[in-house]
Amino acid sequence: MNTKLRRNIIQNSGIIIGSILFAMAYSWFLVPYKIVPGVIGGLSQMLFHFFKVPIGISMIMFNVPLFILSFILMGKRFGTRSIFGMISTSIFADLLSFSSLYKLGIIKDLTPYTFEANGKIFYAMLSPEDIYLSAIAGSVLLGLGLGLIFRSRGSTGEQIYQLLSSSKKQAYRLVWDTG
């Protein structure tokens, strides 16, 4: 197999697996308890909780301007992988929510994941009594997912803020000199 093709398959697979971990962290542990890990995620959660806009849709909406800038300033290769990472995480964030898994027939009974707090019913992996454990588990999964996406030379969008605020030389080192 061609070396370049093999590298692309491995990197794209890493972005997909990282996106799944990222989405599990968001959908199962962080969003149900309104734990905000970042700017785009926070804005997406606000739209979800106040207006019921799916998190994945709002993540894409907020990230579009960033990706235009990343293509211009960081190049086609980084921009393409970042768009792939952002779309993957957005799709999986909506697809892996408990209500979606139930609608798809993957989860047969939502009872173990259904909780009530302050008169509101929500779905989460852990009960409200375990909110700190939920924050820790969500953060660990989110970190693993993002680390795998970065290792695969991609991004989910949020990180483009940091890259665009640094010089092009520093940003290049952050993106490409990681191995």
Image: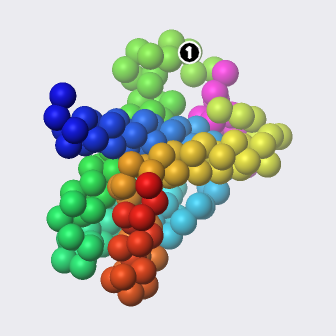
Q: Residue at x 18, y 28 (%)?
A: 1
The residue sitting at the right extreme is: 129
- Residue 21 percent location from the top left of the image: 51, 39
Q: Residue 2 at x, y = what percent? A: 16, 34
Which x, y percent locates residue 178? 46, 60
Give the residue drawn at x 39%, y 49%.
152
Q: Is 149 left, or right, of 87 in this rendering?
A: right
Q: Is residue 161 above or below residue 24?
A: below
Q: Residue at x 26, y 73 (%)?
A: 74
Q: Residue at x 46, y 76 (%)?
A: 162
Q: Which amino acid, by three-letter code, is at mark 1?
A: Asp
Q: In the rendered image of this protein, does residue 29 appear above or below residue 83?
A: above
Pick the residue in front: 168 or 26.
168
Which residue carries the number 1 mark? 109
Q: Which residues are magenta?
A: 112-124
The magenta stretch spans residue 120? yes
Residue 5 at x, y = what percent?
19, 38
Could you tell me what secondary structure mostly forms the magenta stretch?
strand
Q: Is residue 32 visible?
A: no
Assign a secondary structure to mark 1: loop
**Position of residue 90 in the picture relative to residue 28 (left or right):** left
Quadrant in the rendering for residue 3: top left
- Snapshot quadrant of residue 17: top left
Above or below for 88 versus 60:
above
The figure's colour scheme reads rainbow
